Image (cartoon, rainbow, N blue to C red):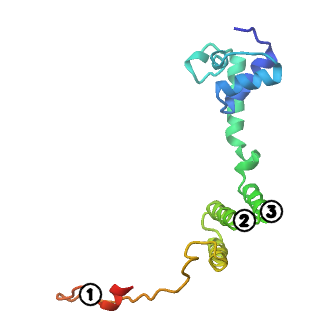
Amino acid sequence: MAALKEPVKIFIVQSLACMETPQQVADAVKQEFNIEIERQQVALYDPTKATGKNLSKKLKALFEKTREDFRNNVFDIPLANKSFRINELQKMYDTTKNKVTKQNIIKQVKDEMHGHSAQLLDLELKQLEIEKIRNGDGEGAEDPTPVKVTIQVVDASKKDAEYQSDTECASG
C-alpha cells in the first residue's frame, strides 16, 4: 500500500462521505493525484465500515461533517432541482424534430410534474398522437376509421337482472 499524504487522505474521506464507491474514489485519486491505489486501501478511510474503524478523529470528524453537508445540500446538485431538470427537458423538446422523442419528453416532464399541469401535458401528448395518425406514422394509421361502440346498461339492483347478448355489440 502506498503511503498517502494529507491532501490525498482528505480527498478520499470527502469523496467517500459523498457516497462514492471505493472504486470510483480510487479512479479519481489516479486522475487527480496520479497515484494508483486499490479500492481496499480507499475503504480504510470510511468510518462507517469495519475497515475504517481505526481512522483518526480528525478524518472521522471531516467525514461526518462532509456527509452531513452532502445530505443537507442536495439541492446544490443541478439534477436534484426539479426546475433545472424540466428546463433541460424543454431544451431537448425544442431542439428535436422527432415526434416520438417529443412524446417521450412530454411523458418525462409529466412524471416530473407529479400531476401539476398534467392536463395540459396530456392535451399536448394527445395532439401529437393525433398528428402522427394523420400523417400515417402512428398506431392505427392503417385504419383511422372510427369504431362504433354500444354500451348496454342493466339495472343490477333487480334480482332477475342478467347480461343480455346484443348482436350489434358482438359485431363491433
Residue at point 56%, 82% (across, down): 144
The kind of secondary structure element at disc 1 is loop
Counting from the top left corner in percent of width and height, residue 115 is at 60, 67
Residue at point 55%, 76% (across, down): 140
Figure quadrant of residue 107: bottom right
The answer to whether any part of residue 64 appears in the image is no
What residue is disc 3 on? 95
Alpha-carbon span between mark 1 and mark 2 = 45 Å
Q: Is residue 95 left or right of residue 47?
A: right
What residue is disc 2 on? 98
Alpha-carbon span between mark 2 and mark 3 = 9 Å
Figure quadrant of residue 105: bottom right
Counting from the top left corner in percent of width and height, residue 169 is at 35, 87
Residue at point 70%, 65% (across, down): 102
Q: Earlier in the sequence, mark 1 or mark 2?
A: 2
Against 108, is 141 above or below?
Answer: below
The disc labelled 2 sits on which kind of residue? Asn
Counting from the top left corner in percent of width and height, residue 113 is at 65, 63
Kindly indicate whether the residue at mark 2 contacts the one at mark 1 (C-beta within 8 angstroms).
no
The disc labelled 1 sits on which kind of residue? Ser
| Residue 28 numbered mark, or none | none
The kind of secondary structure element at disc 2 is loop
Q: Is residue 78 left or right of residue 143?
A: right
The answer to whether any part of residue 127 appears in the image is yes
The disc labelled 3 sits on which kind of residue? Thr
Q: Dot 3: within a 10 Å radius of its alpha carbon, few (fewer than 14), some, or many (20 or more) residues?
A: few
| Residue 165 numbered mark, or none | 1
